Amino acid sequence: MQTLEQDTPSIVPIKTTKKFFLETYGCQMNFSDSEIVASILKNEGYSITGKEEEADVILMNTCAIRENVEQKTRQRLTEFRELKNENPSVVIGVLGCMAERLKVKLLEEEDLVDIVVGPDAYRSIPKLIGEVEGGQKAINVLLSREETYADINPVRLSENGISAFISIMRGCDNMCSFCVVPFTRGRERSRDPDSILKEAKGLFEHGYREVTLLGQNVDSYFWYGGGLKKDFDKATEEQKKSAVTFGHLLSMVAEISPLLRVRFSTSNPQDMTDEVLHAMVKHENICRYIHLPMQSGSSTTLKRMNRGYDREKYIDRIKAIRTIIPGCGISTDIISGFCGETEEEHSDTLSLMDEVVFDYAYMFKYSERPGTAAAKKYVDDVPEEIKKRRLQEIVDLHRKHAHESNLKDIGKEFEVLVEGYSKKSENDLSGRNSQNKVVVFPREHYKRGDYVKVKVHSCTSGTLLGEAIK
Ligand code: SAH
Ligand code: F3S
């Protein structure tokens, strides 16, 4: 007797020969997500193109963190719309945080977009494209408690072949009052450490020399094989024994090879433990660099921001970094003009900057995001002019600090991982030191991927200049 299976002809799926164009805005996590999206599409036969005019599918991976980035996205979508006017079969999709924030509104309000896909629904993109080709608009913005794309091997889109991002967790449970991320990226969940190690090893074997472990709050990374962190009480004894914290994970990745540099982002002052700092000390290849967003130097502002730490706690963490890892580079994020911010609170931000002297800072004007706790509870009452002036004061002070920090490096020797030619000349190479500063030096016989000892002889505001030591 024949079985049903034997009677049924085997179906070989026909893969597409279409091309996709993918443009990415926003944070490192978005760039990392785009590599997952590219991998999902390539598996279906799509090939990537860098030219939007020749694409059958145009995708934008978007950011919703501040209003101005959303405006830029809309502007770009109108340009893509013109391409679609010329060739109506082109499919235009919005992915990521702006897709998740606006959901179906993006399809209804404007006739710019065919598909809308949130950060946890990328596996459904090929199916959604199919639906559009069948004549419908398509959307999937379901957030998940489990999706980590752990099994997907990302297609590397960055061209240097030396450094790569690895997402170790998704979402955020912190609920800082100004921030839209918990709404657009959903609940925090950590990725299986085995899959992270496998990805990092694979990259090293393919010649990569630097990985950056990404999460909105890496210190909160926690894996025990049993689901969400908050359910750890219910874990079996075996699961409890094999639990992995961020400190463990860092050490495991660092132990792949001393030639693999390990970076991570973002640390959070309320969760950053000394365990992580000690793991850094133990492994020289974990870079001496921490991005520790302060947001404000005023304890009362930090309270309204629901950041979970005050000025003293922030200073305590900075002191811990400087004591445990002398010479560690420190960068930060700062927001000017948050709801209710007084002149005195703003001065507290400037004075904390003076106290820390950051090597690098990302500085923003507060931008109200619909649906956040700040939008519901507080009035966005700092006038635009004052926000701007305060931001300028923060930027000016930071420039002075960054220059001071660079001057201090003159005469020092650093190990630089070469990433490519310098922006200005092919006679010079550019790379970064462990502290994440860009170092430029004469090329000689060195090449991309080499570790070169460089002695710094001068600096510009953003770059150290030096020469290789023989
Ligand atoms: N998870 C990270 C940062 C996420 S967003 C953290 O722990 O801080 C990156 C930065 O954007 C934030 O650190 C903050 O400085 C800024 N940002 C977030 N929401 C903002 C808003 N509504 N207006 C202005 N800046 C904002
Ligand atoms: Fe946003 Fe705060 Fe999380 S800034 S990403 S809610 S740590």
Image (cartoon, rainbow, N blue to C red):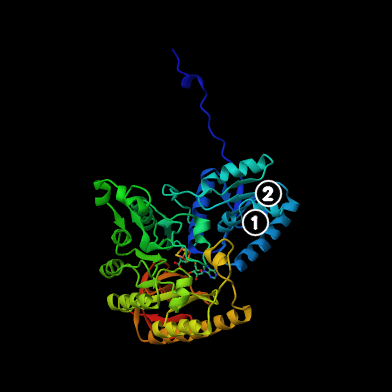
The quadrant in which the N terminus is found is: top left
Q: Residue 101 vs residue 361: left or right?
A: right
The crowding category of the residue bearing disc 2, from other C-alpha atoms within 10 Å (few below 14, some 14 to 19, many at least 20), is many
Residue hosting label 1 = 52
Between disc 2 and disc 1, the foreground one is 2
Residue sitting nearer the eye, 399 or 230: 230
Q: Nearer the viewer, residue 79 or 227?
A: 227
Residue 233 seen: yes
Q: Is residue 308 above or below residue 143?
A: below
Instruction: Name the residue type under label 1.
Output: Glu
Q: Residue under label 2, please give it.
A: 90
**Cα distance, mark 2 to mark 1?**
10 Å
Q: Residue furthest top?
A: 1
Q: Residue at x 53, y 32 (%)?
A: 12
Label 1 sits on a secondary structure element that is: helix
The answer to which image quadrant residue 82 occupies is bottom right
Q: Is residue 233 left or right of residue 146?
A: left
Mark 2 is on which residue type?
Answer: Val
Q: Horizontal and vertical percent for residue 163?
A: 43, 63
Of the numbered discs 2 and 1, the one sitting upstream in the chain is 1
Return the x and y of residue 8 as percentages of the image width and height: 51, 22
Q: Is mark 2 within 8 Å of ligand 1?
A: no
Point 51% across, 59% down: residue: 30
Classify residue 314 by image quadrant: bottom left
